[in-house]
Amino acid sequence: MLANQVKRSARRPHNHARCDTSWSMTDASAMRVGDLELVALNDGLCKLPPEFYVGLDFASHQEMLDDDGRVHIPIGCFLLRTGGTTVLVDAGLGDVDVGWARGGDLPAALRATGSTPEDVDIVVCSHLHIDHIGWLVADGRPFFPNATVRYGHADWAQFVDAPVGDSRTKEIMETLKSAGRLEPLDGDDIPIAPGLTARHTPGHTLGHYGLVVSSGTDRALILGDAVECPLQLEEPDFYAMSDVDPDLAARTREALWRELEGSEALVTGAHFPGLQFGRILKGEGRRYFSANVDRRQPQRAATSTDRIASIEPSPAGE
């Protein structure tokens, strides 16, 4: 289990990589994983100050900064239809502007796929940060009226029982609890729906989960915020200010890289530029992320004998 593997993983240095912000997403972007269709949806935009990436030398990575001197990243969600079940992975920020981020686009993105909030059977939240749960409740009611909400049980104490700062997460989760909509995740390798499994990937938060989509011999991994940026593949010593346990988060990332390295599994994160999927490749003394050129076409992922570990940055503008 990954949560146990991270205790044994050691970090090692890598060469430079890029995390380009020159992307755009104007519609839903779909890709095939075997017989399943996985659709990336964007709820809005985060504009983060350089200080958010603790320990990163921006003098060497000016390409990450937009014209306003901030790092612009999407607020990613993912829609999966499998075995008659419609699953949404993460629920965006909601229809708000909090200064560092602006949400509100998820409902329109859902409509672009032919889906409505009523169609969603399960929402799986990678963790309980507000930019992943914001649409769970709107106007005091569950926004996805027929959905069960799955989340990491270990996040409840920090973000609901004893929240610091913004109380919106607490309000959202308590509303869902009162409505009987919650079903917490505890443990590892938890089946969610046909072809979808939750894997415990702690560190960013203690209850953080990644999601594995599999069909036949194909596989894709949605990392949530276990990896904030592909650059962390080759420069593992910087971390996000929002990591609850930075050392544990680094061990989780290293375990992921080791598992994914050299396989054909497709990988993305909730804030990867353009919400692109790619493969983790191994080079001479380095790892890198190779982004797929066209996610709308069927693409082969890992075989059952492959291991899931390294990320090459996409060329500028992809």
Image: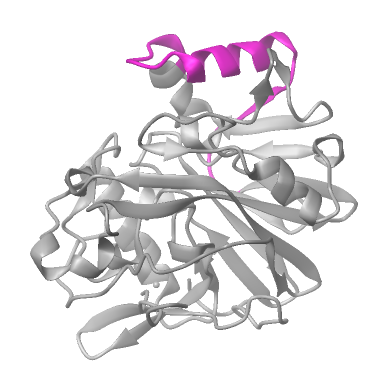
Q: Is residue 192 visible?
A: no
Q: Is 261 rendered above or below residue 128?
A: below
Name the residue nearer the viewer: 34 or 294: 294
57 vs 82, left or right, is left
Residue 263: image x %, image y %? 49, 81
Name the residue nearer the viewer: 146 or 111: 111
313 vs 140, left or right, is left
Q: Residue at x 45, y 40 (%)?
A: 208
Q: Report the colour scheme.
A: one colour
144 vs 19, left or right, is right
Q: Residue at x 64, y 33 (%)?
A: 150
Residue 19: image x %, image y %? 32, 67
Highlighted magenta segment, given as a residue range:
160-189
Q: Residue at x 56, y 39 (%)?
A: 92
Q: Is 161 rendered above or below residue 117?
A: above
Residue 281: image x %, image y %? 39, 83
